[in-house]
Image (tube, rainbow, N blue to C red):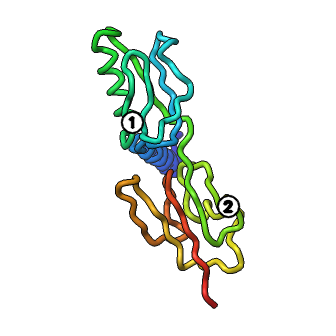
């Protein structure tokens, strides 16, 4: 027998699973990301790990250099399918997924400043925990994040609940007493 509360919990779980999948599908690849490319039935065209170059590109057999910068894994998959159909394979079945995300960086009044591996769902408070916590002089009111690609980087104010993205640079300023 299905109880009303059970239905609510199942609905909530499905909604959560969909939103996590939707966020992953919208993730834009960039320099430093590591992807995996699998072409069904073609082991010579399948790679467990490909690190994107500084320009956000990678080299693929028959195709050459592929620009993945700013594209989702689905867009890269579609691009590879189209290129492989053009004289190489009749019906290529390709999958592209992110193996590891590019790092984010944290500087200023944290105990262990530096670069750290991005994790989906990361917030500023968790990023600070990865960096060993705040120093005694840290301000929780003066925190900024620099986001964007090299050509369009913008600084924005942040709170402990601000989402961190791969490639972000976080700065924790010193507080004045």
> 128 or 2: which is nearer to us?
128
Can residue 13 be seen here? yes
Residue 144 x/y as whole percent: 49, 70
Residue 94 x/y as whole percent: 41, 21
The residue at which mark 2 appears reads as 131
Residue drawn at x 44%, y 43% is 30
Of the 4 image quadrants, the one containing the C terminus is bottom right
Residue drawn at x 53%, y 22% is 47
The residue at which mark 1 appears reads as 68
Verify CB contact (< 8 Å) between mark 1 and mark 2: no
Say above or below: 127 vs 51: below
Secondary structure beneath disc 1?
loop
Q: Hey, which quadrant is residue 129 in on the image? A: bottom right
Mark 1, Cα crowd under 10 Å, few <14 / some 14-19 / many 20+, is many
Residue 133 x/y as whole percent: 69, 67
Between discs 1 and 2, the one toward the N terminus: 1
Mark 2, Cα crowd under 10 Å, few <14 / some 14-19 / many 20+, is many
Say above or below: 116 vs 158: above
Say above or below: 116 vs 107: above
> 55 or 169: which is nearer to us?
55
Query: Position of 79 compared to 142: left or right?
Result: left
């Amino acid at each position: 027998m299905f109880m009303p509360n059970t239905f609510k919990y199942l609905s909530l779980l499905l909604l959560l699973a969909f939103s996590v999948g939707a966020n992953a599908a919208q993730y834009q690849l960039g320099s430093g990301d590591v992807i995996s490319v699998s072409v069904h039935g073609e082991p010579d065209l399948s790679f467990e790990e490909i690190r994107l170059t500084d320009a956000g590109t990678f080299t693929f057999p028959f195709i050459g250099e592929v620009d993945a910068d700013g594209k989702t894994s689905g867009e890269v998959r579609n691009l590879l399918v189209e290129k492989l159909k053009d004289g190489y394979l009749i019906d290529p079945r390709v999958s592209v997924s992110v193996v590891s995300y590019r790092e984010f960086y944290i500087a200023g009044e944290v105990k262990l400043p530096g670069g750290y591996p991005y994790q989906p769902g990361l917030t500023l408070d968790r990023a600070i925990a990865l960096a060993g916590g705040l120093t005694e002089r840290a301000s929780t009111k003066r925190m900024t994040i620099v986001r964007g690609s090299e050509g369009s980087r913008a600084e924005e104010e942040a709170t402990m609940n601000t989402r961190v993205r791969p490639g972000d640079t976080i700065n924790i300023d010193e507080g004045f007493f």
